[in-house]
Image (cartoon, rainbow, N blue to C red):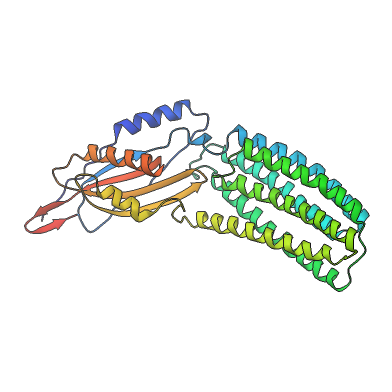
Amino acid sequence: MAQSIPRKQRFDQNQVAEQEHRHHDTHQHDHDHDHDHSDVHAHDHDHGHSHAHGIGHHHHGPNNRRGLTIALGITSSILILEFVGGLLTNSLTLLSDSGHMLSDAASLALSLVAMWFAAKPAAPNKTYGYYRFEILAALFNGATLFLIAGFIIWEAYHRFLNPPVVSSGSMMLIASIGLLANLASAWVLVRKSDVKSNINVRSAYLHVLGDALGSVGAILAGLIMLLFKWYIADPIISVLVALLILRSAWGVIIQAVHILMEGTPITINSEAVKQSLLVIEGVRDVHDLHIWTITSGLDSLTCHLLVAEDADDQTILQQAVDLLEREYKIKHATIQVETSRLQHGDMKV
């Protein structure tokens, strides 16, 4: 019976780079990749590991923390103002917006806590560290937006039946202050944080934008009531704001769940990755391809490359690593190279 001799060769260049990364990075990361190859077929194996350099700073750096901290201070101050103002003016729009701001303050604080957890070093039982805590925080923030929107709609329903008199002038003044504060918080997050690619920061940012919408709604409702004494405008606009909040929250929840289910990153087409690897000279097949997101800005990949018998394994491995980083921004990849053997008309793979 034909037998293949297992060969375990490490990709020295990446191994040296990994050692340098562990020496210089302030956050230590342990990456354990366990592969069970108790296949009934025989294999020749080359294992290549390409690890991201400096991934400890990819999404929870000081700018993100600073932006969230400033936004938290602004939000907490306006929260008190709108709550007291809502009680004094009898405005559901202001009260609902203050409730939303309470959730915002909690979400901003949670996002900061998540960043602190994510910065903790990896442990033997958590080889990727605590990166996923940021995704859990984003999921929680999205869920709280749903609860707040539901509360606003419920209160609006009762006010539709019997619209109360609202001190529209005071309501507009307080809402205007709240709007300016929310816009300031949003500006700080955009300027100081990674709103675009960090789902944790973006979920907090959406909370702040929801507050801004609530303030705009309160100003509009106050203006209508001031001019026309049409007090039902308060619950109507509150519902409209709640629906906008729900739309934003749904997007965050869907993305967070997708990451937790280890789905392929929305920015990457797995079939396109496979075809790109097949273009490398000497690669005959790509299988067991898995691509997932650990946390925002940190994607991982594992796959097996079946190469021709006379191919240079290490050259192919280096080309694959370079291609993944250059074209797909994947810096953390584990690639196993397998060499096929053809003897007596039977292919052993």
* 343 to the left or right of 30: left
Q: Quadrant of residue 153?
A: bottom right
How many badges with numbers are in the image? Answer: 0
> Can you give x and y, in whole percent of width and height, for residue 81 in the image?
86, 46
* 176 to the left or right of 68: right
The N terminus appears in which quarter of the rendering? bottom left
Location of residue 271 with respect to 71 vertically, above or below: below
Single out the residue that lies furthest toward the front. Answer: 227
Q: Residue at x 37, y 40 (%)?
A: 325
> Can you give x and y, in whole percent of width and height, for residue 282 in the image?
19, 45
Single out the residue that lies furthest toward the left. Answer: 344
Q: Quadrant of residue 88?
A: bottom right
> Can you give x and y, in whole percent of width and height, for residue 250 in the image?
61, 60
Q: Residue at x 80, y 46 (%)?
A: 178
Q: Residue at x 88, y 65 (%)?
A: 231
* 324 to the left or right of 170: left
Q: Nearer the viewer, residue 159 or 105?
A: 159
The C terminus appears in which quarter of the rendering? bottom left
Q: Quadrant of residue 257?
A: bottom right
Location of residue 144 with respect to 196 vertically, above or below: below
Single out the residue that lies furthest toward the bottom. Answer: 161
